Image (tube, rainbow, N blue to C red):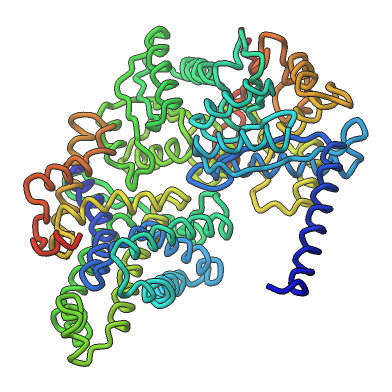
Amino acid sequence: MTRHALKPLVGATLAAISLCSGGFASAQDAYLIGVSGAMTGSAAATYAPVVESMRAYIDHINSKGGINGRQVKLVISDNQGEASKAAADAKKLLTQDKVLMLVNASLSSTYAPMVAEAKRANVPVFYAGAVCPKETYPPADPLQFCSTAFGAQYDSQMALATVKEMAKEPVRIGFSAMAIPLSRGEIDYAEGLSKTMGMTPVDKQIVPPPTPDYTPFATKLKDANPNWVYSWAPWVTQVRTLESLRRLGWNGRYIAYAHLNAEDELARLKDNEFYVFGTNAFFQDNLPIQAELRAVMHRAKLNYPITQLSEGYIAGLVLEAALKGAGWPTTAAKVQASMSNLKVDTKGLRGGPIEWTRDNHFRTKQHYRVYKWDTSKGAITRVKDWTAVEVK
Amino acid sequence: MQLVVNIAVLASIYALISCGYVLIYRVSRVLSLAHGELMMLGAYGLVTTASLFAAQPGVAVAAAGLLAAATGALVYWVLMRRMTGEAVLAAVLATIALGILLRGAMVLIWSAQVQHPARMLGFDNPVVALPGGARLSTISLLLVGMNALVYLALWWFLTRTRYGIAMRAAGQNPRLAAQRGINLHAVYALAWGIAVFTGGLTGILIACDAGLDATMATIGLKAFPAALVGGLDSLVGALCGAVIVATAEVLLIHYVDPLLSDVVPFLVLTAMLIVRPWGLFGSREELDRV
């Protein structure tokens, strides 16, 4: 290579260095938040909308001047729901990007490596849309926080309480879970709880993901003759088990967790005896905050149904409140301190505020609603309005 | 009776997927580990054609089928053709890379959301009641029928048509086939086209029955043991392997533990590898090549 030919290369390198140093300079003037999410892979349908809507909310905040006069920069990595990739993401985000907080929006298998890295660096981990680990329940781990709607054990307590309230006859209950630790653990807990509540558990189907045909599992469940079935699993398992049961002629009542796509899916299925319970308000409420959310997402041109974007929006609200409380200039320790004493008004997107204390990084009260499709009205109806469950 | 129907449906799914593995391997000696992704691509093809021809479901399905076949031929022409003469492992690795690429691309193009192509086409998939009290969805019934049709059509094609016989010849002895004037690249491309068409058809039917999401590719991998149990170079073997694996899976779910369904195909495969490593209908010579 001649010296002449090297000139453009040297120029390009110098330009790149100059751009990079400019980038670093601007990053130091902004709140840097690291996000590792399952943006692709088998779990992407659940987590990608959360990350995208959180990003859209942060962009919205930045367009209004940022937080404490500073921009917020999200450094987003795709871990594809794999623990090894999450570990690499966490290491890179903490050592190279020097983020103030790690956000996890992925499968529970990615938690351990990310938390291990975060503990080494003493940086808080915020679970957004990812299921809340027990470490966020009282007495909480000082570094782990969670705003995700669903919560193990509290959900089953709510579901079975609803079943008990609604059942006029003795309850023979069947269970359906996905063969992943979290779902199985919750359904095992629910099975035990049902006995203490005077119900008769008749069968439990643990369905491995992915399954080409749910009918063999549903056949066994139906043969046990339950009058209620409870499922706490990713939406695909919940709904495909129900659909298979209906095809087999089972006419009982089915209750499941209202994941992000529940509102759209109730309208698709039009099943009068399918109940969903959850902590996010449906968009049929037409709240002012939902109108604002619509506008923000419209500007961001997101390719997801609006009904699936509230979880990420709430995560954005929490992030905003945490950084506001941390002030500027800030450190990871200040962010953690702010998160340990936080109250976020969800403006109706949830039944109450998200409140974190020193010992409780989940929320002090979990509010649930129960919905179903009403065939006579041709619309989704509210079976049970906001019901608060104390988190102790 | 319901158990028999469940076995028939699951066996049909596995058999339809397996015939793609077998066709490609039998003709071009390549083990395609991108078959699950190509099957999923066929289903996403229907999502696209359904949005274009929502009022004409037949046209949408036919267009998706043709797209799948064309994709198969294209994969051979653009990627696998260049693997000719390379080590078998290189070709297998190329299909793995293709699978990873396709998985990422499909999420980028169609998002990770669950899609319901049957609903887009206005088909509500009613339940069919069979004698003996068994019930299944219309699309599941169609899947069983389509499986029978595909295998019959493949038997007729491979034994009664010029291209089918050329395909068998190319699979048996490529050098001799080439010397007899058979265009090997055209035959291989045709095999890939048919294999991806049958895979795509399975993807389309599963997507219409239960919805479509990014996990479908893994279903393709679950059918792989069926192909190996039957013998990787035998279509009859693929059919028998699918029935054996599906029977074991459904019966164990019902009588033992549903969790076993995930490991059953591989348990059956392990047992077969110990007793008869070349599969039920596979030829012993092929084993050395694998």
Front-most of residues B130 and A84: A84
**Residue A389, relative to residue A294: is it above or below?**
above
- Asked if one can make out residue B172 in the rendered structure from this viewpoint, the answer is yes
Residue at point 81% right, 43% down?
A24
Looking at the rendered image, the quarter that the N terminus of chain B falls into is top left
From the viewer's perspective, tell me whether residue A364 is left or right of residue A223.
right
Front-most of residues A304 and A339: A339
Question: Where on the picture, by quarter, is residue A237?
Answer: top left
From the viewer's perspective, tell me whether residue A372 is left or right of residue A336.
left
From the viewer's perspective, tell me whether residue B268 is left or right of residue A48.
left
Residue at point 72% right, 15% down?
A356
Residue B231 pos. (x, y %)? 14, 58
**Residue A192, relative to residue A286: is it above or below?**
above
**Residue A363, relative to residue B35: is it above or below?**
above
Residue at point 38% right, 38% down?
A241
Front-most of residues A220 and A100: A100
